Image (tube, rainbow, N blue to C red):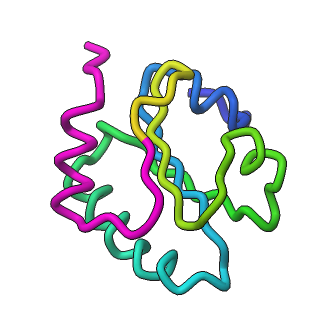
Amino acid sequence: MSTQAKTFQELIDGDQAVLVDFFATWCGPCKMMQPILEDAAKQLGSKVKILKVDVDKNQLAASKFQVRGVPTLILFQKGKILWRESGVVPTHQLINTLNNNIKDTV
């Protein structure tokens, strides 16, 4: 594996599914998503990579994907948006949604 860090674009263009959490540090619902995302990461393992993008520090990325509110979750695979949702998503709903949308790369 390369030690060079991948760019955001390289990550979302890859074969592995990437769930991007567009959040803000001042956002209460965003803080509620943190343990949900951690739980989803544990349950899904290597099936999905979870990235957090602070919209205040990464306004270009937020603008590119038309993030109007936080939290906004967007699932990418091979550069395509498979799913997106704004607001807090309960753990079971998030895991079901991810399992239903992620394409196996095997």
- Seen in the picture, residue 58 relative to 12 is either above or below; the reply is below
Total number of numbered discs in the rendering: 0
In the image, taking residue 81 as reference, residue 104 lies left or right, namely left
Residue most toward the top?
A: 106
Quadrant for the C terminus in the image: top left
- Seen in the picture, residue 66 relative to 31 is either above or below; the reply is above
The structure residue drawn at horizontal position 82% and vertical position 64%, both measured from the top left corner, is 57
Q: Residue 46 at what x, y percent from top left?
A: 32, 40
In depth, the one of 66 and 57 nearer the eye is 66
The structure residue drawn at horizontal position 75% and vertical position 39%, both measured from the top left corner, is 64
The structure residue drawn at horizontal position 28% and vertical position 58%, both measured from the top left corner, is 40
Quadrant for the N terminus in the image: top right
Q: Residue 8 at what x, y percent from top left?
A: 69, 38
In the image, taking residue 99 as reference, residue 53 lies left or right, namely right
- The image quarter containing residue 93 is bottom left
Q: Residue 17 at what x, y percent from top left?
A: 41, 32
In the image, taking residue 72 as reference, residue 33 lies left or right, namely left
- Seen in the picture, residue 43 relative to 48 is either above or below; the reply is below
- Seen in the picture, residue 58 relative to 27 is either above or below; the reply is above
In depth, the one of 86 and 25 nearer the eye is 86
Residue 56 painted magenta: no
Read off the magenta span: 84-106
The structure residue drawn at horizontal position 29% and vertical position 37%, both measured from the top left corner, is 47
